[in-house]
Amino acid sequence: MRKSEIKRQTNETTIDVSLNLDEANQPNIQTGIGFFDHMLTLFASHGQFGLTVQCQGDLEVDNHHTVEDTGIVLGQAFRQAVGTKAGIKRYGTAFTPMDESLSIVSIDISGRPFLHFDANIPVEKVGTFDTELVEEFFRAFVNHSMTTVHINLQYGTNGHHIIESIFKGFGRALFEASKIDDVQRGVPSTKGIL
């Protein structure tokens, strides 16, 4: 079973993430940021992952450290859970509508961190959540999971719908990329390593 648990403590956050790529359960997400909890729950549900996130952060400062550090730890947990990458599909893409919004998320579990984020979210906040933190979360995840992720918003006008489309698509694309391939048994690279 491909699973991991990562704990990380700094002066700004204390985070415990448990991730299971092969067995979905009811996500248990508690970061202290309601909208972010909702997005991570959607990510896990649409990715069919077992995910628990417990985070205590310096929310009296703002949400930045909690969101970014959660991305760091979730990225580390994914990298550990996917292991040697033998037998995975490696690539995944999801076109995900949410009402008037449509996003495309493409992932390569390549061993090379890169984020292309092209999503103009037309509001600065959704509730109390700073929308600029969406990109910060994905950059942290990418850098610590060693994946290549392209996020492109095709169109959308509602900030909540746009972000929801992206997180759902991220879950679906990551599920596809990390899925075990019935044909490919080794590492999916002509180099023999990812």
Image (tube, helix red, strand yellow):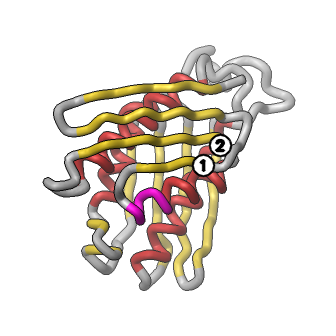
Residue 86: x and y in percent read 69, 20
Residue 27's disc number: 1
User: Which marked residue is nearer to the observer: mark 2 or mark 1?
Assistant: 1
Q: Where 115 falls versus 129 (above or below)?
A: above
Residue 130: x and y in percent read 27, 66
Q: Residue at x 49, y 60 (%)?
A: 39
Residue 77: x and y in percent read 49, 29
Q: Residue at x 55, y 63 (%)?
A: 104
In space, the residues marked 2 and 1 are separated at their CA atoms by: 8 Å
Which tag, 2 or 1, sits closer to the chain's start? 1
Q: Where 6 falls versus 45 (above or below)?
A: above
What are the residue bounds of the magenta stretch? 34-38
The foreground one among 1 and 17 is 17
Q: Residues within 10 Å of mark 1 (few under 14, many from 20)?
A: many
In reply to whether residue 33 is colored magenta, the answer given is: no
Q: Residue at x 85, y 28 (%)?
A: 183
The foreground one among 183 and 71 is 71
Residue 51 sits in quarter: top right
Q: Residues within 10 Å of mark 2 (few under 14, many from 20)?
A: many
Res. 124 in view:
yes
Q: Where 31 falls versus 144 (above or below)?
A: below
What SS does tag 1 mark? loop
| Residue under label 2 | 49
Residue 122: x and y in percent read 32, 80
Q: Main secondary structure of the magenta part?
A: helix
Q: Residue at x 55, y 55 (%)?
A: 41
Task: Classify the position of the N terminus by image quarter.
Answer: top right
